[in-house]
Image: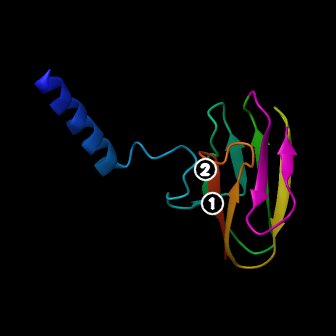
Amino acid sequence: MRRTRSAAFGAALLCVVAAGCAQPGAAAETPADTATVDLPPSYRFAPATIRVTRGTSVTWTNHDNFTHTVQVTGQSDVHQMRPGESTRITFNTPGEYPYVCTLHTQNMRGTVTVT
């Protein structure tokens, strides 16, 4: 039993060090240069962190089996997407724009960086 606890602790420590156990949808990743974000069947945005140029419209497409939303922090609009639907938001001002699925806030978060 002692060996099992030690192995579990070691696995948990390795997971933290390798950052392989971050919550899905966490916005701590390197920004991807893309204007499309998928919502695969996993309660996450992929990629969650993107970089676009000023004036770009970003498209989120829901490939999951459940309804999701996109809401940019500080904006009142909540963009709802049923399975198979998409939504677009245009970013005209440089800056960092965190966003969230208002239905699944614990694990569906991301950031759009506008240059």
Residue 89: percent from the left, percent from the top?
83, 60
Which quarter of the rendering shows the C terminus? bottom right
| Disc on res. 83 | none
The residue that label 1 is drawn on is 50
Instruction: From the viewer's side, name the closer residue of 56 and 64.
Output: 64
State the residue lying farthest toward the top: 1
Locate residue 82 relative to residue 45 in the image: left or right: right
In the rendered image, residue 86 lying in the magenta stretch gets the answer no
Corner quadrant of residue 32? bottom right
Task: Determine whether 16 is above or below 32 in the image.
Answer: above
Q: Which residue is pictured at 20% across the width and 38% down the height?
A: 10
Q: Quick one: quadrant of the N terminus? A: top left
In this view, the residue farthest toward the left is: 2
Marks 1/2 in contact by CB < 8 Å: the verdict is yes
Instruction: Tell me if residue 66 is in the magenta stretch.
Output: yes
The picture quadrant where one finds residue 42 is top right
Q: Could you tell me which secondary element the residue under label 1 belongs to?
A: strand
Q: Amino acid at mark 1?
A: Ile
Please report the bounds of the magenta region as a residue range.
65-81
Q: Is residue 51 left or right of residue 26?
A: right
Q: Position of residue 12 (x, y in %)?
A: 29, 39
Q: Taking 85 as reference, is 70 left or right? A: left
Secondary structure beneath label 2: loop
Type of the residue with mark 2: Pro
Residue 67 picture location, percent across and down: 80, 35
Classed neighbour count for the residue bearing mark 2: other residues with Cα under 10 Å, few (<14), some (14–19), many (≥20) = many
Q: CA distance from mark 1 to mark 2?
A: 7 Å
**Where on the picture, by quarter, is residue 74?**
bottom right
Q: Which mark is residue 47?
A: 2
Q: Residue at x 63, y 56 (%)?
A: 110
